[in-house]
Amino acid sequence: MKAAPLRKLFIVVYVAAYRNHSNQTISVVIALAPALRLLVRLEVNRMPYKKPDFIGVAYASRLFREYDYQSSYDAFVLNTRPQPDLTNPTHALELLTWLNKWGCRIEKKEKFQQLIPELGQWYTNQEPQLPTRNIDISELDTNGLDTLESAFKAMRDCGFGSTSAAKALFAIRPKCAIPWDEPIREEFGFGDDGFSYRRMLDRSCQEAKMLIEDAKKYGVKGSVEICDNVGASGSSLAKLLDEYNWITITERHDIPSRGELEKWISWCQ
């Protein structure tokens, strides 16, 4: 049984307990949640994490596009074109709205109004220091890592959680800032602080370089051609790596082996 269905089962049990007004049952479910999570991670039959290669990224990107997450991001990009400017309250509101659609839980009535001016101040202070918009994640250097780490910490100081801060940074620099979530942090042994985010960026930078080299074996050169060939034109390597992480780690979906893929292709002949 996959971890995602197990998580859904846990939610169903919790909702049933809530509807039955059983506080004692709710307390038991909450108390058992950490143990359930550990059990899932230890017992789910799943291959170990495999670093992203060209075929794996293509497969994961295709699966990711079956979810509704892509449409909400596309709407954010459309509504903040030509580029997000968080000193514009409308753009800041669009960001917060998209973050919640992308799985964050930012309280809308009170928190939104508090965060909008703070996002504007963050943007004024941090955006000019960030890597330029055309810098790819595979091109990050020490200075780029430094500035993204500082921007992440400043975003946390605004009241954002670790997941929402990384996703917000991605919204501002979609080519070089990679999102993450708690299962991804746990998989790689990272905390939720700025230094851990820097380590995640560095790791992703190295994976992006390896992905570029692997794609060359198939006659695909560079980040733009990779995105085009996997059906994600206009995307970025940072986005593709995030999709790969989300599919393989958060959703616990195994990438088919080369042997499996060759068997499936043989059925079409």
Image (tube, grey):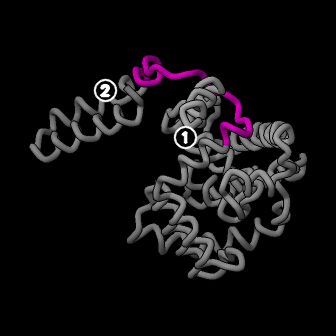
Count of picture labels: 2
5 or 189, which is in the foreground? 5
**x and y percentages locating residue 188 in the rendered image:** 64, 30
Classify the position of the C terminus by image quarter.
Answer: top right
Residue 58, above or below 34: below
Q: Which residue is mark 2?
A: 32
- Which residue is the site of mark 1? 247
Q: Residue at x 82, y 69 (%)?
A: 128
Judged left or right of residue 112, residue 25 is left
Callout 2 amino acid = Leu
Q: Is residue 48 magenta?
A: yes
Numbered disc 2: secondary structure: helix
Check residue 107 for magenta coloring: no
For the point 34% across and 31% down, the residue is 6
How busy is the neighbourhood of tag 2: few (under 14 within 10 Å), some, or many (20 plus)? few
Along the viewing direction, whichever of 194 and 174 lies nearer the viewer: 174
Q: Secondary structure at mark 1?
A: helix
Where residue 124 appears, x then y in whole percent?
A: 74, 73
Q: CA distance from mark 1 to mark 2?
A: 26 Å
- Where residue 179 appears, x then y in whole percent? 63, 50
Q: Quadrant of the N terminus?
A: top left
Q: Left of 39 or right of it: where is 229?
A: right
- Judged from this view, the residue extending furthest toward the left is 20
Identify the residue at image location x=84%, y=64%: 134
Would you place residue 99 above or below residue 62 in this image?
below
Find the magenta span and give its range: 38-57
Position of 203 compared to 104: left or right? right
Tag 1–tag 2 contact (CB < 8 Å): no
Q: Is residue 25 above or below residue 174?
A: above
